[in-house]
Amino acid sequence: MSKNPVSKSKPVKRNEPMHNALKFFLAGCVAEIYLLVIRRFYVNGTANELLACDAALPYLMAAGAAVAVIGLVLGIVWRQQTKRRWIGWSVFAAGVFLGGSAWMIRTFYDSALTFLCVVVPVVMLLGILWNLYDRECSWSLTILGASLIALWVCRRVLDSIFLGTYVRIAAVVYIVVLIVAAFLTNKADKNGGKLGNLQVLTAGADPMPIYAACGLSVVALAIALFSSTIAYYAMWALAIVVFALAVYYTVKQL
């Protein structure tokens, strides 16, 4: 009798990463459709549709805040229950997205919508990668994905009279963060993949993809600071690297 539960539990365990990846995919699709609907009425709609959306956004902010609080409470209450805990934190994330996106759209209008329409698919893909690939692969692609978003922001805002300086400061801070990330990766590699009690890498993992991701990102951001045109070409060069690595990791995983 004891063999049957074990044999039944193995497929469930194998399928769990795929189920989680599917959840990220569906959540990303819903979020992107939501943003496109808002763009249709708030940016490309008539004057009446624009005013109606503008009036509805504060209510969406309040609703998002309420949902986030409910999700936070559920996540804390169910923190010891693995099956329920993810529900609470999923509700919290949905509330943060709903309220935060409404605030950004009302404050920055079309620029915020364009930014969110880019970020949502990137986060969706990274969520899928974190569930399907090894940690070193996931870390390297996450770093490169964040760097692509940073380059895209530089491309759009670097020449702005009002925001250009702030973008340059943020880019320098991000470069420092990348250097620190490479240092911490080296430290974790020497400690069995752990930083303190936190297991950030699998034991014996190859840290080279993370070093390469940090190095390429630092070079791309550093040269992008000179002009938005350079940022544009650096963004596409890094995008090609991300695509090549994603294909390589996928083939390796298969």
Image (spheres, helix red, strand yellow):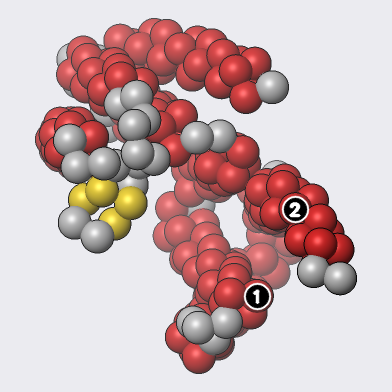
In the displayed structure image, the side of residue 229 where residue 173 appears, left or right:
left
Where, quadrant-wise, is the N terminus in this rendering? Answer: bottom right
Q: Secondary structure at mark 2?
A: helix
The foreground one among 69 and 117 is 69
In the displayed structure image, the side of residue 90 where residue 178 appears, left or right:
left
Vertical position of residue 247 compared to residue 165: above or below: above
x, y percent for residue 50: 67, 59
What amino acid type is highlighted by mark number 1? Lys
Mark 2, other Cα within 10 Å: few <14 / some 14–19 / many ≥20: few
What amino acid type is highlighted by mark number 2? Lys
Q: Mark 1 and mark 2: span between their CA atoms?
A: 17 Å
Residue to which mark 2 is pinned: 10
x, y percent for residue 88: 58, 78
The foreground one among 38 and 34 is 34
- Determine whether label 1 and label 2 are within 8 Å by CB: no
Where, quadrant-wise, is the C terminus in this rendering? Answer: top right
Residue to which mark 1 is pinned: 83
x, y percent for residue 202: 39, 40
Q: Secondary structure at mark 1?
A: helix
Q: Is residue 211 in sight in this rendering? A: yes
- Whichever of callouts 1 and 2 sits on the residue coming sooner in the sequence is 2
The foreground one among 86 and 198 is 198
**Location of residue 203 by image quarter:** top left
